[in-house]
Amino acid sequence: MKFVDEATIRVEAGKGGNGCVSFRREKYIPFGGPDGGDGGDGGSLFLLADANLNTLADFRFERRFKAESGQPGAGANCTGKSGADLTITVPVGTEVYDQDTDELLGDLVENGQRLKVAQGGFHGLGNLRYKSSVNRAPRESKPGTPGEVRNLRLELKVLADVGLLGLPNAGKSTLIRSVSAARPKVADYPFTTLYPNLGVVRVGPHRSFVIADIPGLIEGAAEGAGLGVQFLKHLARTNLLLHLVDVLPPDDADPVAAVQVIERELEKFSAELAARERWLVINKIDLVPDELRDEYCADIVRRLDWSGPVFRIAAIAGEGTRELTYAIMEHLEQQRAALEEQLPAAASEADAAPPQPE
């Protein structure tokens, strides 16, 4: 299935059923009085996050969704049947925007999470509701209200613990194939990755993380050049970025310049993303003789003035990938443990805070 990470749809909630004007007509009861029932409520529309979906491709074919309207009321104080709600499934990680106002309506980040995106119309009132001591035979009723109508923009941001950065042909797809069961396309020409690929990396029993292979960036990506800018938003949910660089880029290019190109594009796209923790991964070291590897890698690190973690790997041969994945797993576990410690502390502070005067 083709990867689609944006879609625009129209949702229409059901209209509320009209109230009924009716009077009792029974034998021997000449003045039976009003008995018109209320209408039924219109159905609402919900979005449901489903972990079994990984793309918005289905919305290429069906873009309009409408819930059932409520049935009108009837005599004998019969209430109309309410319209059924309509639930639309979307991938986990979908952000929902109102297309007309650009308002963020919700962010579906957990499997089974539901979001109401269109409220159904409310039921109309029958004439029985208007009976009073001074109005014994009301002939008025209230119609149901229209259902909410919205144009929605769905944006999918893949959920991954680790994101891969790098120029085209830096070896990102090869790395994800080496450390996980994912099988993205690998070839000796640039832009072989046309959409994000996710892989689950297992480093032991109950120890795993998700890694995302993002299409390669080029200079000018933040202004719309190349493919990568379209998918940069997918890195927003990652906890850690791995910056892959080819130790011997083709055409005698400078690996330091390759890293700096990506850094500039990240800063243009998002200052917050540029400040995200990033590890340097020097790939394809098997192309350098053993006696020159230390010299080549040290030169790259020195000229970049890199202060973070540095790893040397040969993804196609699996060299160094085990050490890299174990380091990532330990880092993520430390992050999760720190977060778990912060949550009870924050809850305790909230409980201890004095009540605010009204």
Image (cartoon, rainbow, N blue to C red):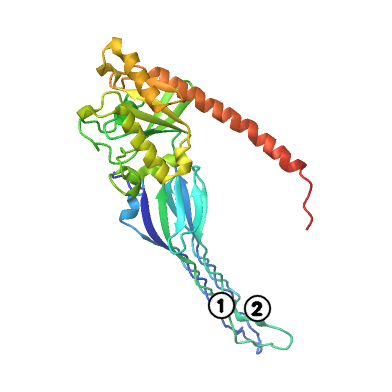
* Crowding at mark 1 (Cα within 10 Å: few <14, some 14-19, many 20+): many
Distance, label 2 to label 1, CA atoms, is 10 Å
Q: From the image, tell me which residue sits under label 1.
A: 19
What's the amino acid at mark 1? Gly
Placement of 288 over or under 55, stated as above or below: above
Residue 141 pos. (x, y %) = 58, 81
Q: Which numbered disc, 2 or 1, marks the residue that appears first in the sequence?
A: 1
Identify which residue, 167 or 101, lies in the foreground: 167
Identified at 49% across, 44% down, the residue is 109
What's the amino acid at mark 2? Arg
Marks 2 and 1 in Cβ contact (< 8 Å): yes
What label sits on residue 129 in the rendered view? 2
Residue 317 pos. (x, y %) = 29, 18
* Crowding at mark 2 (Cα within 10 Å: few <14, some 14-19, many 20+): some
Residue 336 pos. (x, y %) = 56, 30
Placement of 310 over or under 22, stated as above or below: above
Q: Is residue 274 visible?
A: yes
